[in-house]
Amino acid sequence: MSHSVPGAIVDLTFPHQWQAEVLASRPVILPRRNFVYPRNADEAERGALEVLIRPGPGEPEFLATCALGFRDPAAPTGLWSAPALEEICAVAGGYAYLIDTTAPERFTMIHYRPAVQIVAVLEEDLLLFAGHHSILAWGRHGQVWESEKLSDEGVKILAIGGGLLRGAGWEMWRDKEVPFVLDLRTGRRMQ
C-alpha cells in the first residue's frame, strides 16, 4: 500500500485481500479496467481520488476514480480497509465509497455529504462514518445501523471501548457541545 497524495489517510485496521495505491494524478495510459464512482458523476476526474487496486492473486488490477466531495482539508481523503476482506473504502473530500474489489461494478456510496470522521472498530467489526448529524456503522454485510440525530451541526467520535461509543454533538438551542453515548451493537443512544 502506498500513497502519494498529501494529507491522504491510509488506515488498514481490518485484514484485507487487496492492495491499493493512491495515485498523485490520473495515469496517462489507463488500465484495461477502470471505474468511476459514482457512475453518473459529471466531471468526476476533476480533483478525484485516483486509486490503483489489485484485488488479489490472479485478478486483474483496476483504476477507481472517486469523485471529490469537498476541497476543505477538514473533509477526509484516503483509504480504509473494511470489515469484509474484499471491500475497500475510498474517501475523496468526505465522499465515501465502499467498493467490492472482486466485482468493482458493485459499490455503495455512503449518504453523508460529507462524512467528517471515519473510524475502524476492529473489536466490533464496524467501520464508522460520522456525518454532521448522526453516525452510520458499516459491517461485513453492509450497513448495520444508523444512529438517531445526535447534533445540529457536527458530530465527534471521542472514545470507543467496552461496547460503547462516546462522542459529542453541538446543540443549537443550548449553543454548546453535548456528550452522548451509543451502544456499538445497535447504535441506540444510552445517554
Image (tube, rainbow, N blue to C red):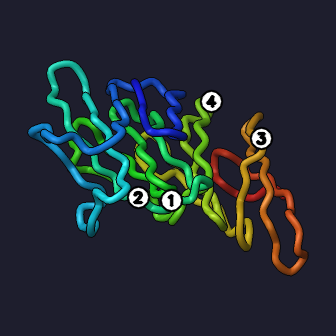
Identify the residue shown where x is 14% and y is 29%.
60
Distance of mark 2 from mark 1, alpha carbons?
8 Å
Q: Is residue 63 left or right of residue 153?
A: left
Identify the residue shown where x is 30% and y is 42%.
100
Q: Name which residue type carries label 2.
A: Leu
Q: Where residue 80 sits in the image (x, y, percent)?
A: 47, 37
Whether 190 is drawn above or below 28: the answer is below
Distance of mark 2 from mark 3, alpha carbons?
28 Å
Q: Name which residue type carries label 3.
A: Ala
Q: Are marks 3 and 1 in contact (CB under 8 Å)?
A: no
Q: Are marks 2 and 1 in contact (CB under 8 Å)?
A: yes
Identify the residue shown where x is 54% and y is 40%.
7
Report which quarter residue 127 is drawn in: top right
Residue 68, numbered circle:
2
Q: Name which residue type carries label 1.
A: Arg
Q: Residue beneath label 3, please?
A: 159
Kindly give the residue lying farthest to the bottom in the view shown: 173
Neighbour tally class for label 3: few under 14, some 14-19, many 20 plus, Cα within 10 Å = few
Residue 123, numbered circle:
4
